[in-house]
């Protein structure tokens, strides 16, 4: 049973959390309701695009990176959504580098508990464009 | 098919001999029946099976005929028969040298196909492949 005075999620009680979810609209609602794995994929794709346009690599590596990006096309994530993503900027890359230092299991959780996607989308608004194309 | 007179109408004769049709069946009816039979998988398999048996069983007869040819110098096929036997007894030896070169270097050849695929995938993902940095030309290193 859920107790009304206990913290349920992100410092909010169950009632507060329910009210907060009900108040969400537009992009905020999308960020909360799209599975965190897909949010993580979109952020990773931005980082990989940065690598593609910045780093010199062999044909094999380039094809491998492109194929890796294509593996993110799954469920609601479409080619159109991935095509809309702009390469990550320096700030986004630093955030993702810090997240990638975490154990694998905790990396995606950062997108739920730490509101990382909202932060990344402020640095790289194309992530929100891609998210809208996912829905 | 193996016992009736060969040539035009052999299949129809074989069908009639096998009991298909009736005594009053017309030639056209038997021809239709035989045509269907000649395209029937079971019949085709049976003919192949019988043919293989026939060939194996005909071996001694063929060898006797060959022997007769060899022993008859006046026969026009004598020379060919002798040559056939000699070829099988002392086959001409040939030496074939086959060089297979397998390139398994770690370097991935930037072939036109690979570059085309890179451009194709990049276009799908909204990346202009013409704006990408130049590719590194990877060369395999000689081991010390």
Image (cartoon, coloured by chain):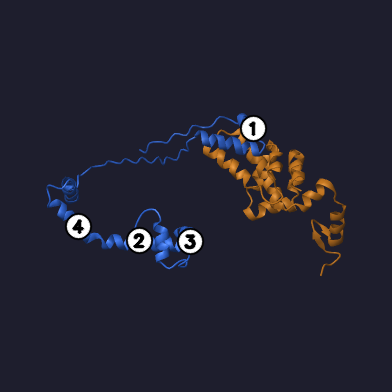
Chain colours: A orange, B blue
Picture residue at 84% right of the left edge, 55% below the top:
A21
The residue carrying mark 2 is: B4
Q: Position of residue B126 (x, y in %)?
A: 67, 36
Total labels: the figure holds: 4
Compare residues A81 and B107 and report the one nearer the observer. A81
Disc 3 to disc 1: CB gap under 8 Å: no
Q: Which mark is residue B128?
A: 1
Question: Dot 3, crowdedness within 10 Å: few (<14), some or many (≥20)?
Answer: few
- Chain of the residue under the numbered disc 2 shown in the image: B
> Which one is in front in this view, the residue at disc 3 or the one at disc 1?
3
Report which residue position mark 4 lands on. B63
Q: Which mark is residue A1?
A: none
Q: Which residue is mark 3?
A: B26
Residue B104 x/y as whole percent: 41, 42
- A92 or B34, which is in the foreground? B34
**Quarter of the figure with the N terminus of chain B:** bottom left
Is B8 on the left or on the right of A31, as rendered? left
Q: Chain of mark 4?
A: B
The CA span between labels 1 and 4 is 75 Å
Question: Would you call the spot at circle 4 few (<14 residues within 10 Å), some (14-19), or many (20 or more)?
Answer: few
Q: Tell me whether circle 2 and circle 4 mark residues in contact (CB < 8 Å).
A: no
Query: Are discs 3 and 1 located on one and the same chain?
Result: yes
User: Can residue B101 be seen in this snapshot?
Assistant: yes
Q: Position of residue A11 (x, y in %)?
A: 81, 57
* Between marks 2 and 3 in the image, the one whose residue lies nearer the viewer: 3
Q: Secondary structure at mark 3?
A: loop
Say whether residue B87 is left or right of residue A58: left
Q: Is residue A21 left or right of residue A119?
A: right
Give the number of the mark in front: 4 or 3. Answer: 3
For marks 1 and 2 on the same chain, the one whose residue lies earlier in the sequence = 2
């Amino acid at each position: 049973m859920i107790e009304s005075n206990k913290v349920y999620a992100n410092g909010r009680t169950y009632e507060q959390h329910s009210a907060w979810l009900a108040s969400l609209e537009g992009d905020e609602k999308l960020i909360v309701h799209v599975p965190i794995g897909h949010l993580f994929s979109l952020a990773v794709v931005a980082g990989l695009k940065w690598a593609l346009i910045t780093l010199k690599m062999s044909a094999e590596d380039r094809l491998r990176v492109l194929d890796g990006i294509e593996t993110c096309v799954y469920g609601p994530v479409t080619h159109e959504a991935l095509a809309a993503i702009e390469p990550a900027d320096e700030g986004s890359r630093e955030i993702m580098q810090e997240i990638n230092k975490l154990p694998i299991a905790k990396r995606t959780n950062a997108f739920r508990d730490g509101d990382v996607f909202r932060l990344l989308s402020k640095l790289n608004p194309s992530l929100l464009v891609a998210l809208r194309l996912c829905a | 098919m193996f016992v009736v007179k060969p040539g035009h109408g052999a299949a129809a004769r074989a069908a009639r001999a096998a009991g298909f049709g009736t005594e009053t069946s017309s030639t056209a009816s038997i021809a239709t029946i035989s045509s269907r039979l000649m395209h029937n998988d079971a019949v085709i398999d049976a003919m192949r099976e019988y043919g293989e048996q026939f060939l194996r069983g005909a071996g001694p007869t063929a060898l006797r005929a060959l022997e007769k040819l060899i022993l008859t110098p006046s026969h026009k096929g004598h020379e060919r028969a002798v040559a056939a036997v000699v070829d099988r007894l002392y086959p001409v030896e040939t030496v074939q040298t086959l060089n297979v070169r397998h390139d398994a270097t770690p370097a991935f050849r930037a072939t036109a196909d690979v570059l085309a695929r890179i451009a194709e995938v990049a276009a799908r993902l909204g990346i202009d492949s013409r704006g990408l940095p130049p590719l590194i030309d990877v060369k395999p290193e000689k081991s010390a």
